Amino acid sequence: MKKAAVVGNPVDHSLSPDIHSFWLNEAGINGIYTKETVKHENFGSFIVNAAKKGYSGLNITVPFKEKAFKLCDVLSETAKELGAVNLIIFENGKIMGDNTDGQGFIDSVIEKIPNLSFKKNNFSILGAGGAAKGIIHALCKNGAKNINIINRDLKKAKDLASSYSGIATPYALSDIEKGLTDASFLINTTTMGMKGGPDSIEINFSEFPKIICFTDIVYNPKTTSLMSDALKSGIKVIGGIGMLVNQAVPAFRAFYGEEPRNLDSLYLVLENKMKVDHND
Ligand code: ATR
């Protein structure tokens, strides 16, 4: 039986087992995907021994993506550039690391706007943490030429922008108006508005007429308060569940050797699951 898991601390609310189990079932594969809560001090030995325990690969989540990076024998270019790994594959006795988060975001946007030109749009990103890092890296790989990074902690925005000179400009969240003036695409990568997370700022999108699309990487709740703000101004919105599903696509291929099937039904399954959890 092919075996994989998501490893983190905590991982209780991870939807990855629902995603992979759905695809396993659809493809009729004799496989299993579990979630493993691992203590910080045990993470290294868990990874090093996982192949022996029969895992074909692992997804790595908070707070272990940087630690996992350091344990890999072979790294993809993306993982090298980000210094973080969300996917580990065990192959020929080696630990191979990749990072599929950023491209997962891009694929989720292309799913909704197939002809989007990354070159021609101006992107503004709320946040400068790990998620922002992955998304900015992927935006650049896909041709983005203009990215504003807006963050509560300006220093973090400046540090991140310095890796993309000529493309990225940092702004403090208190200066958000300046960071949004030229934007055609706004992406929230912060935890603002997440169930159990900090309250969100409000944005009056009608003050920024160039913005055509707002995407939020938060997927629970399905419609965040920033998405509601955008909808009020008639702006296209894309929620975070697509990024979660699309980052899992290459993982499923690598773990089980088959193509994921029936994404439309999967989205319905995940939405229903979140509704149930929400009423807990
Ligand atoms: P992730 O890996 O998911 O990006 P992270 O690295 O902890 O998580 O980053 C969280 C992001 O959410 C950061 O940009 C953080 O802003 P700071 O760098 O200023 O801390 C942002 N964030 C978290 N809580 C916030 C709040 N209440 N208001 C604004 N931004 C917030």
Image: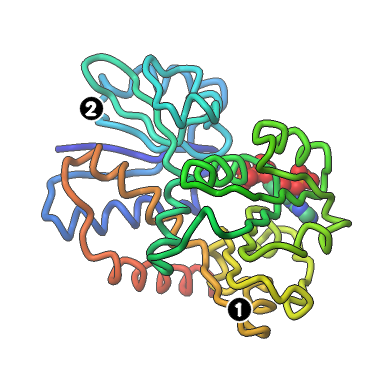
Are discs 1 and 2 less than 8 Å apart at CB? no
Q: Amino acid at mark 1?
A: Ile
What's the image's color scheme? rainbow
Indicate the position of residue 187 as horizontal and vertical percent values.
Answer: 62, 59
Residue 271 left/right relative to 26: right
Q: Residue at x 61, y 63 (%)?
A: 185
Indicate the position of residue 63 as horizontal and vertical percent values.
Answer: 58, 35
Rendered view: 186 above or below 52:
below
Q: Residue at x 77, y 49 (%)?
A: 151
Q: In the depicted view, which residue is nearer to us: 144 or 267?
A: 144
Dot 1, crowdedness within 10 Å: few (<14), some or many (≥20)?
some
Indicate the position of residue 39 as horizontal and vertical percent values.
Answer: 54, 29
Q: Quadrant of residue 213?
A: bottom right
Q: In the depicted view, which residue is nearer to us: 44 or 118?
A: 118
Q: How many marks?
A: 2
Rendered view: 232 above or below 256:
below
Mark 2 lies on residue? 54
Q: Residue at x 43, y 46 (%)?
A: 103
User: Does ligand 1 reach within 8 Å of label 2's beta carbon?
Assistant: no
Q: Amino acid at mark 2?
A: Gly
Which disc number belongs to residue 276?
none
- Residue furthest out toward the right: 174
Mark 1 lies on residue? 235
Sequence order check: which comes first, mark 1 or mark 2?
2
For the residue labelled by badge 1, is the local secondary structure a helix, a strand or a loop? Answer: loop
Q: Residue at x 83, y 43 (%)?
A: 154
Rendered view: 65 above or below 202:
above
Camera-near label (1 vs 2) is 1
Q: In the depicted view, which residue is nearer to us: 240 or 276?
A: 240
Q: Quadrant of the N terminus?
A: top left
